[in-house]
Image (tube, rainbow, N blue to C red):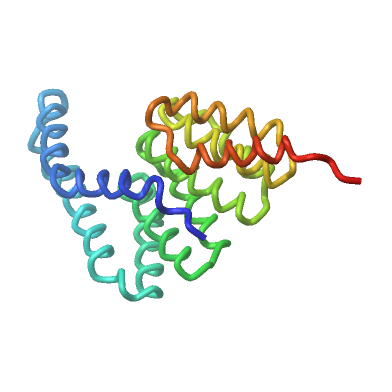
């Protein structure tokens, strides 16, 4: 089940950004808050705590990625101990990807739900939601997929949302709704419309023009 192609580069970019700039961002926040609550106290606690979380997250990714059991165990432990950390959602996304490689779709749905609930930004929430919806469509959980997609996601994800809706409608035999969704996806994409999406709409048009046989 290929569900990690569309947004994978976005997630990697987010992780890479944090790896390159996370400490700088955290330091900036510390300096900003310092004038209000006292830099020394905040530095001794929050700053070191965030650095430790960053190190712990990276060690889980680096040291456990090749060992599925260890990766899941350490990842779930990290999330349970740091549910409010910005890294909790990224860890859940990584766990979902690992579970998907073993086709453990129950675990994938659980981990993606965790990623949604702990997401520090609307963008990460949207990425996790799209992945969850794709899994639900593949598992023929169409109503659940549509509910996942109707959860106030950012407008910038409209094209992907409508395309997945189209897939769900088409697999239910609701061709009119599928066509409307695909057209909405293309309208949202504009000049960036993917060939695969256009093919879906073209194939749907051919289905509509087929003669009815008795």
Question: Does 46 sit left or right of 149 as displayed?
Answer: left
State the image coordinates of residue 89 (x, y, percent, origin top left).
Answer: 38, 48
Q: Is residue 41 visible?
A: no
Residue 66 picture quarter: bottom left
Depth order, front residue of 69/4: 4
Q: Total of numbered circles in the picture?
A: 0
Q: Is residue 180 visible?
A: yes
Depth order, front residue of 115/4: 4
Is 119 placed above or below 108 here? Answer: above
Question: Does 199 sit left or right of 34 as displayed?
Answer: right
Taking the spot 52% from the left edge, 28% from the top edge, the residue there is 152
Is 96 placed above or below 63 here? Answer: above
Question: Does 164 sit left or right of 30 as displayed?
Answer: right
Taking the spot 84% from the left edge, 41% from the top edge, the residue there is 212
Is 75 placed above or below 150 here? Answer: below
Residue 181 picture quarter: top right
State the image coordinates of residue 147 (x, y, percent, origin top left).
Answer: 63, 38
Residue 55 picture quarter: bottom left
State the image coordinates of residue 107 (x, y, percent, origin top left).
Answer: 53, 62
Taking the spot 38% from the left edge, 27% from the top edge, the residue there is 191
Depth order, front residue of 77/39: 77
Depth order, front residue of 214/74: 214
Q: Residue furthest right?
A: 214
State the image coordinates of residue 122 (x, y, percent, origin top left).
Answer: 40, 33
Taking the spot 40% from the left edge, 54% from the top edge, the residue there is 92
């Amino acid at each position: 089940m290929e569900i990690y192609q569309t947004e994978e580069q976005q997630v990697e970019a987010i992780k890479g950004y944090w790896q390159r700039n996370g400490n700088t961002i955290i330091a900036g926040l510390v300096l900003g808050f310092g004038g209000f609550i006292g830099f020394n106290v905040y530095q001794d606690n929050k700053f070191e705590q965030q650095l430790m979380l960053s190190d712990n997250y990276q060690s889980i990714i680096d040291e456990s990625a090749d060992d599925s059991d260890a990766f899941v165990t350490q990842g779930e432990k990290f999330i349970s101990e740091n549910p409010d950390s910005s890294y909790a959602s990224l860890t859940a996304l990584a766990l979902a990807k690992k579970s998907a490689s073993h086709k453990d779709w129950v675990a994938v749905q659980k981990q993606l739900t965790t990623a949604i609930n702990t997401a520090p930004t609307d963008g990460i929430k949207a990425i996790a939601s799209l992945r969850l919806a794709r899994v639900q469509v593949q598992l023929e959980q169409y109503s659940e997929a549509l509910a996942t997609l109707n959860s106030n996601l950012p407008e910038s994800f409209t094209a992907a949302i409508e395309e997945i809706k189209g897939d769900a409608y088409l697999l239910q035999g609701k061709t009119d709704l599928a066509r409307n969704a695909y057209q909405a996806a293309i309208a949202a994409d504009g000049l960036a419309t993917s060939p695969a999406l256009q093919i879906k709409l073209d194939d749907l048009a051919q289905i509509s023009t087929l003669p009815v046989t008795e």
